[in-house]
Structures are given as C-alpha cells and as structure tokens.
Amino acid sequence: MNERLKKITEKMQKGQPVVGIFVLIADSSVSEIAGYAGCDFVWIDSEHGMMDRREIYHHVLAAQAAGACAFVRVPGVDYDQIKNTLDMGPDGVIFPFVNTPEIARRAVEACTYPADGGKRGIGPLRAIRYGVDNEAEYLKAAKDEVWKIFQIESMEAVEHLEEIARVPGYQSLFVGPADLGMSMTDIDPKDKPARIREVQRRAARAAKENGKFCGSCAGPTRESCMEMLGNGVQWMTIAQDARILSGFLMEAVRNIQGD
C-alpha cells in the first residue's frame, strides 16, 4: 500500500474524517488545487465528467503530486476502460451501480491479474513508474495496490447489500445518496433523507463486518462530516468542483448587486 493510501487508512482507523471533492472539470489543475488545499482524495469522474483518457491521466498525476489520493470513477464494469485506467496508476477505482454480487465480482476481476483469479490484461505503464519499478513484483502485489470501491446507489443494491459486502477483493463501499434517493420511487420525498441515513448505517455495518471501509457524501461543514462519522461513514465527498465555482460566483454577484 502506498503512502497516500496508508495516510487515509490511518486517519479512518483513528476515527478522523477523510474528505475530498468530486472533479468533473477537465483541467487537471483542479485536482492539484484540491490536494494543496488539504483534501485527502479527489474523485475523478469519468462516469459523468467530460474528460478523455489523457485528461483523466493528468488528473491522476496532479492529485498525487499534490499529496491526495486519486480515485477514478469509471463508467461501469468495462474491462477495456478499467484496464487503461489501472495502468495510469490511480490509488483507487470507483464502480457505479454495483447492484448485485455478480457485478461486484466482475469489478474485482477487472482489476485483478489472472494469477489472482482475475481478468486484467498485463501492460502496466505509469503503475510501475514507466519501468523504474520491477514489473514482476508489481504483478504480485497489484491486487492490494489499488482500492476497488463499490457504489451502493439503488434499491436493488440495497436488497443485495450484505451479499455485495461479502464479495472478496474490494476495499470500500460507497453510498451514493443522489441516485439512491432517485430510486426510492415508492417513498414519500420527505421520508427519503431518513431512509438514506438508514442505508448509510447499514452499509457501514456491513463493510465493518467484512473488514472494509464505507464512504458517502457530506456537506462542506464539520457538523455534516461528524454526522457522517456517527453513521459509520469514514470517508466522504464534501463538494463538486463546478458547484464550488458557480456557488461562490453567484453569491459574490448577489452581494455586489445587492440582490
């Protein structure tokens, strides 16, 4: 495990919140700024973000150079996309809509070499520092060098939550409240926040029982992050890059114009 992952693991084990931001803007300076600002990780989003492979690669470089873990959310369990992302050397890969144990197992397989029961193709590049590191040694240790993170963000996933949590080979669950709330079609909107908190607590218990971590979303305040910790959530996103910019600018313009 690299020093960045060791750092956040130690913080979680001490009961300290681990925080970061969603990054969708293509310019990699955003990830660099986040790291310099003290974020523990950046969530580089290639599911919803408009980044190509080179831009994702530059975000990984920038985040890590600034001391933050680089977690890349891939669009799905696509072996080709995952293989390319892994070879960039990120600290973690986030899988959206892990709704069943079967999807979870496929995600782990995509990140794992055949010697360890997976299907990852061999061709690491930056992951072995362009050949400075011994490739054979990397192949032996690779399954533990990159976090595999399963998103729980649908009622189908909730139904299979404990089964998903028992799948071997991953490091963390992550409850996605936005899509989870959207999937609660039979629940009164005013009851959804409480139901989402129930899922967060349940996911945290399931993760802990299997020796894993649990993440989710919080607001950009200490109070919100402490509430998440109280629910058993150990690492959390606190903002999104584009909304940080638009929110600050809208508030500034309103104040200047007196609206």
Image: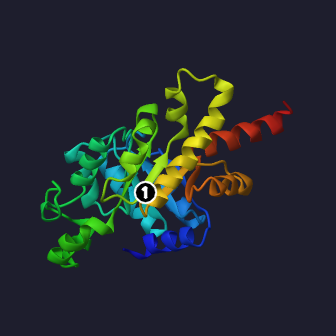
The residue positioned 24% from the left and 42% from the top of the image is: 78
- The chosen color scheme is rainbow
Q: Which residue type carries mark 1?
A: Ser
Mark 1: secondary structure: strand
Q: In this view, does 61 lie above or below 242?
A: below
The residue positioned 38% from the left and 74% from the top of the image is: 2
Q: Which of 22 and 178 is in front in this view?
A: 178
Residue 29, horizontal then vertical, whole percent: 49, 57
Q: In which quarter of the image is the N terminus?
A: bottom left
Q: In this view, does 143 lie above or below 151?
A: below
Is disc 1 surrounded by few (<14), some (14 to 19) or many (20+) residues within 10 Å?
A: many
The residue positioned 52% from the left and 53% from the top of the image is: 204
Residue 3 in view: yes
Tell me: 154 left or right of 250: left
Residue named by callout 1: 172
Q: Quadrant of the C terminus?
A: top right
Residue 16, horizontal then vertical, whole percent: 62, 67
Q: In this view, does 124 lie above or below 164?
A: below
Picture quadrant of residue 143: bottom left
Residue 48 in view: no
The residue positioned 52% from the left and 74% from the top of the image is: 10
Picture quadrant of residue 38: bottom right
- Disc tally is 1
Residue 238, horizontal then vertical, whole percent: 61, 51
Residue 142, horizontal then vertical, whole percent: 25, 68
Picture quadrant of residue 4: bottom left
Residue at the limit of the structure toward the right, as seen here: 258
